[in-house]
Image (cartoon, rainbow, N blue to C red):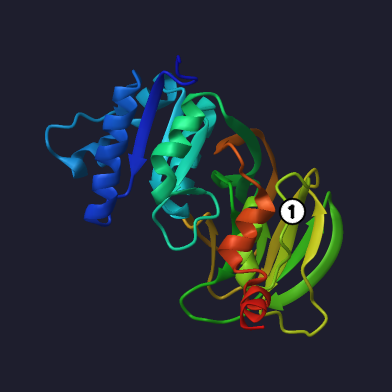
């Protein structure tokens, strides 16, 4: 049967011999199915054994699918670099949790085989365009798949900021910071800050304060069509970061402006993928109930 994807890129962060072995095994499997395999340059260098590597531009222009082996951080990095090329991604989990890398290592060959045979689903995930502005000039322009965060810096002092939605003043808050999370990012940093879980199909953003200096400040969900603007009022030391990659120091008077991107990340899921089944597995939902039944 002809493969649904003829040119496939392999991307991995080789933190252990097990990941390297999985990459070699997957490369051999794909080649045995008649696929052209492009190994990302840093991944190929780590593999050694004469592996030749391709940069992200080559992958973006030549690959029909990118398979990422590792954890969510590895997937985030690959997604940020490939989104403008519209290359879909699928992930084999070798991280700790793996909300975005949903193929289990033990099922790697079967799941990838199903995808090659056309038994898969495609899911689009929203991105944020982010700008930091100072005195009317753009200091930094980047994207965020998970979240944009303004937080206190190394001095550990609270910051004070004003929040606006579509130009409308919402509130002023003193806190350690604030997270603006996409549905994808709602199960990342925002989840640890007691934010809501947003299903990927919900067109919303979660605004999650970090340790606010008031008991009444709570996470809020807003339309992802809103323009979110955060203005620093007082901050001895403040920083913004985006998916944990892009980082920028911010000063009083700076503004972070966020709006939904026109681009989207496309995830390829193997046959049988279900979002809530994934959450039950990753977050151990119903585990105590099931154990209790086993003891009855």
Q: Name the residue nearer the viewer: 1 or 96.
A: 1
Q: Secondary structure at mark 1?
A: strand
Q: Name the residue nearer the viewer: 118 or 202.
A: 118
Q: Is residue 193 above or below residue 240?
A: below
Image quarter hosting the N terminus: top left
Q: Residue furthest right?
A: 168
Q: Position of residue 195 (x, y in %)?
A: 71, 68
Q: Residue furthest top?
A: 2
Residue 26 is drawn in which quadrant? top left
Q: Residue furthest front?
A: 296
Q: Is residue 231 above or below residue 136?
A: below
Q: Position of residue 77 (x, y in %)?
A: 44, 46
Name the residue at 66% across, 50% down.
275
Q: Residues within 10 Å of mark 1 (few under 14, many from 20)?
A: many
Residue 171 is drawn in which quadrant? bottom right
Image quarter hosting the C terminus: bottom right
Name the residue at 44% across, 41% down.
78
Residue 201 visible, this angle: yes
Q: Name the residue nearer the viewer: 181 or 48.
A: 48
Q: In this image, 177 relative to 21: left or right?
A: right
Name the residue at 30% across, 23% down.
32
Q: In this image, 235 relative to 222: left or right?
A: left
Name the residue at 78% across, 50% down.
204
Q: Position of residue 124 (x, y in %)?
A: 65, 36
Q: Name the residue nearer the viewer: 232 or 292.
A: 292
Q: Kindly identify which residue carries mark 1.
A: 205
Q: Position of residue 11 (x, y in %)?
A: 35, 39
């Amino acid at each position: 049967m002809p493969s649904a994807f003829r040119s496939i890129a392999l991307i991995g962060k080789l933190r252990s011999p097990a990941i390297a072995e999985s990459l070699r095994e997957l490369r051999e499997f794909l080649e045995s199915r008649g696929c052209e395999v492009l190994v990302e340059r840093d991944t190929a260098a780590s593999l050694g054994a004469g592996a030749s590597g391709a940069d992200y531009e080559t992958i973006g222009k030549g690959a029909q699918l990118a398979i990422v082996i590792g954890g969510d951080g590895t997937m985030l990095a690959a997604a940020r670099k490939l989104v403008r090329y519209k290359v879909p991604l699928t992930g084999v989990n070798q991280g700790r949790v793996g909300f975005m890398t949903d193929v289990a290592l033990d099922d790697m060959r079967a799941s990838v085989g199903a995808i090659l045979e056309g038994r898969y689903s495609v899911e689009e995930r929203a991105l944020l365009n982010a700008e930091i502005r100072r005195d009317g000039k753009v200091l930094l322009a980047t994207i965020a798949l998970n979240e944009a965060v303004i937080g206190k810096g190394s001095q550990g002092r609270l910051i004070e900021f004003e929040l606006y939605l579509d130009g409308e003043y919402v509130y002023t808050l003193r806190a350690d910071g604030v997270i603006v999370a996409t549905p994808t990012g709602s199960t990342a940093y925002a989840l640890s800050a007691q934010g809501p879980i947003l299903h990927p199909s919900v067109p919303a953003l979660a605004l999650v304060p970090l340790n606010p200096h008031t008991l009444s400040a709570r996470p809020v969900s807003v339309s992802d069509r809103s323009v979110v603007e955060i203005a620093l009022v007082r901050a001895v030391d403040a920083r913004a970061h985006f998916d944990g990659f892009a980082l920028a120091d911010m000063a009083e008077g700076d503004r972070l402006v966020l709006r939904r991107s026109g681009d989207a990340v496309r995830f390829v899921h193997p046959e049988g993928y279900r979002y809530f089944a994934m959450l039950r597995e990753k977050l151990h939902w119903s585990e105590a109930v099931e154990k209790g039944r086993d003891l009855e």
